[in-house]
Image (cartoon, rainbow, N blue to C red):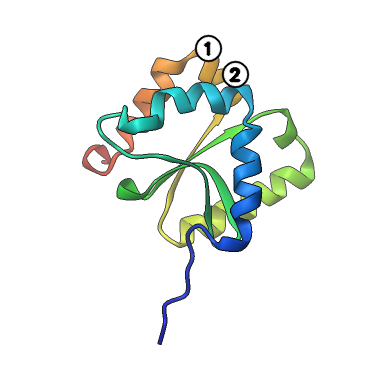
Amino acid sequence: MRKKKIHDKPELRTYRRELRNNATPAEAFLWKHLQRSQLEGRKFRRQHSIHNYIVDFYCASEGLIVELDGQVHINPLAEEYDKKKATFLERMGFLILRFENRMVFDFLPSVLKDIRDHFKENRK
């Protein structure tokens, strides 16, 4: 029996590309520091799909998801969706880190340290 594909579903490919091409300023800024395995050699993907959800950044070797939250996330519908998404992904064994967009700009070293601190070898 063939295993069901859960990552990068083909039917979400166009939408993922659209999200990458229209990244928020915070996503584009953080991506400059995650791309090309710059953070301790870990490979991150941006706008990666897992099941029917698209996450901002994903590191497969760490099972780590990084989500950025801007103004669009500050409303009851978005908050409920984010909670449902996080619960589903956490039950699958993924670790999710969330940062507000302004944190990426104002405290980038701390954001990168927090991500590094959650690499498997550093988890307590």
Q: Are marks 1 and 2 in contact (CB under 8 Å)?
A: yes
Residue under label 2: 102
* Percent position of residue 52, x then y: 60, 60
Q: Identify the mark at residue 98; answer none if there is no mark.
A: none
Q: Is residue 30 left or right of residue 16?
A: left
Q: Is residue 101 above or below residue 51?
A: above
For the point 62% across and 34% down, which residue is it?
A: 21
Under mark 2, the amino acid is: Arg
Instruction: Work out which residue is located at the far top of the displayed protein and give it.
Output: 106
Instruction: Determine the residue located farthest toward the right in the rendered image.
Output: 76
Q: Nearer the viewer, residue 122 or 70?
A: 70
45 or 117, nearer to the observer: 45
Find the residue positioned furthest to the bottom.
1
In x, y percent, where is residue 7? 47, 60
Which quarter shows the C terminus?
top left
The quarter of the displayed image where residue 67 is located = top right
Who's the residue at 60% across and 44% down the image?
17
Q: Marks 1/2: CA distance?
A: 6 Å
Residue at 62% over, 57% down: 12
* Helix, strand or loop for disc 1: helix
Relative height, residue 91 to residue 77 (above, below): below
The quadrant in which residue 93 appears is bottom left
From this view, report whether residue 103 is shown above or below residue 63.
above
Identity of the residue drawn at 74% across and 34% down: 72
Total labels drawn: 2
| Above or below: residue 100 compared with residue 121 | above
Kind of residue sitting beneath label 1:
Asp
Q: Quadrant of the N terminus?
A: bottom left
Q: Which mark is residue 106?
A: 1
Where residue 6 sits: x, y (%)?
Answer: 49, 65
Q: Find residue 76 and report its horizontal and vertical position in percent.
A: 78, 43
